Amino acid sequence: MKYKTWQERFEEVLAFKKKHKTLPSKNRKSRYKTQNSLARWLTQQRKYKRIGKLSKNKINLLESIGIVWDGKKQLEDN
């Protein structure tokens, strides 16, 4: 299995948001095949930011598409 680059995953999240008008969030009953995988990736990005391992450029890109850094708040909003 080929691992995807950060940019590839970001593009997938961006495409998901454009199509569904929301960022992916964890949902056991999701009707979208890739939603949970992308939601897990976003959760990892939140963790990396929290521990200082996410570059400012990546933070800016994620903020440009509307990430909420508090994942619980993201779930409430969705």
Image: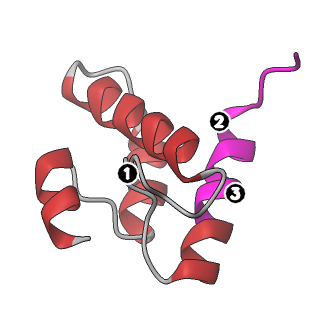
Please tell me in which quadrant of the rendered image residue 39 appears.
top left
- Residue sitting at x 59%, y 58%: 13
Is residue 5 in the magenta section?
yes
Residue receiving disc 3? 11
Q: Residues within 10 Å of mark 1 (few under 14, many from 20)?
A: few
The mark found on residue 6 in the picture is: 2
Rendering coords of residue 4 (x, y %): 77, 30
Q: Which numbered disc, 1 or 3, marks the residue that appears first in the sequence?
A: 3
Quarter of the picture holding the N terminus: top right
64 is higher (above) or lower (below) than 2: below
What kind of secondary structure does the magenta stretch mostly adopt?
A: helix
Region in magenta: 1-14
The mark found on residue 18 in the picture is: none
Q: Is residue 31 left or right of residue 76?
A: right
C-alpha gap between disc 1 and disc 2: 22 Å
C-alpha gap between disc 1 and disc 3: 21 Å
Q: Could you tell me if the residues under marks 2 and 3 are in contact, i.e. CB atoms within 8 Å?
A: no
Residue receiving disc 1? 27
